[in-house]
Image (cartoon, grey):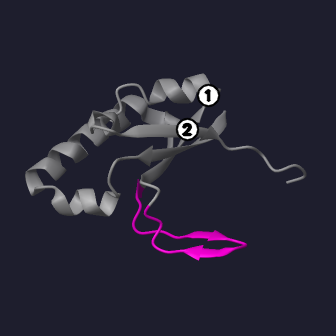
């Protein structure tokens, strides 16, 4: 099995979405996520979490806050291949949010490690 890093992208930062959500909407959202987690089962290595404010650090310096990226959260899945990881994301509740998308990347082994 291989590991895959999942990035949840949205039109707004996760912190902003959480602040704007009613307690009832937040509860419904968590219910949908837990139902997805039950379907994905052992394919989930780490449910991950929402991400707060971030910075982009490069040789040229640091940008703060990183407002051009709306990576709202992450997770880690395991599957035989990228198609298998994508199948685990079918019907994911994050995609119910208008403008939302999910990126999934295979985590490669480091040579010699």
Give the spatial CA distance, label 2 vs label 1: 8 Å
Residue shown at the point (43%, 63%) measured from the top left = 67
Q: Residues within 10 Å of mark 1 (few under 14, many from 20)?
A: some
Residue 86 lies in magenta, yes or no?
A: no
Q: Badge 2: few (under 14), some or many (20 or more) residues near its Cα, within 10 Å?
A: some
Q: Which residues are magenta?
A: 49-67
**What residue is disc 2 on?**
104
State the mark number for residue 82. 1
Q: Of marks 2 and 1, which one's residue comes earlier in the chain?
A: 1
The C terminus lies in which quarter of the figure? Answer: bottom right
Asked where in the image residue 105 lies, by quadrant, the reply is top right
Residue 61 locus on image (x, y percent):
65, 76
Q: Does residue 47 appear in this view?
A: no
The residue positioned 43% from the left and 34% from the top of the image is 41
Residue 93 vs 75, above or below: the answer is: above
Residue 14 % position (x, y):
33, 57
Circle 2 SS class: strand
Disc 2 to disc 1: CB gap under 8 Å:
yes
Tell me what residue is drawn at x 18 percent, y 52 percent.
26
Residue 16 is left or right of residue 54, and the answer is left
Which quadrant does the N terminus fall into? top right
How many callouts does the rendering have? Answer: 2
Q: Position of residue 73 (x, y in %)?
A: 42, 53
Residue 78 located left or right of residue 38: right
Q: Is residue 88 above or below residue 66?
A: above
Confirm whether the magenta stretch covers residue 61: yes
Measured as percent of width and height from the top left, residue 25 is found at 13, 48
Q: Nearer the viewer, residue 84 or 11?
A: 11
């Amino acid at each position: 099995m291989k590991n895959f890093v999942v990035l949840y992208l949205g039109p707004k930062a996760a912190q902003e979405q959480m602040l704007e959500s009613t307690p009832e909407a937040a509860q419904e959202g968590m219910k949908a996520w837990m139902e997805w987690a039950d379907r994905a089962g052992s394919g989930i290595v780490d449910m991950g979490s929402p991400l707060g404010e971030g910075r982009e650090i490069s040789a040229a310096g640091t940008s703060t806050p990183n407002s051009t990226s709306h990576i709202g959260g992450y997770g880690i899945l395991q599957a035989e291949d990228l198609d298998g990881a994508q199948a685990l994301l079918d019907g994911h509740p994050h995609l119910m949010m208008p403008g939302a998308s999910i990126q999934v990347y295979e985590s490669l082994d480091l040579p010699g490690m």
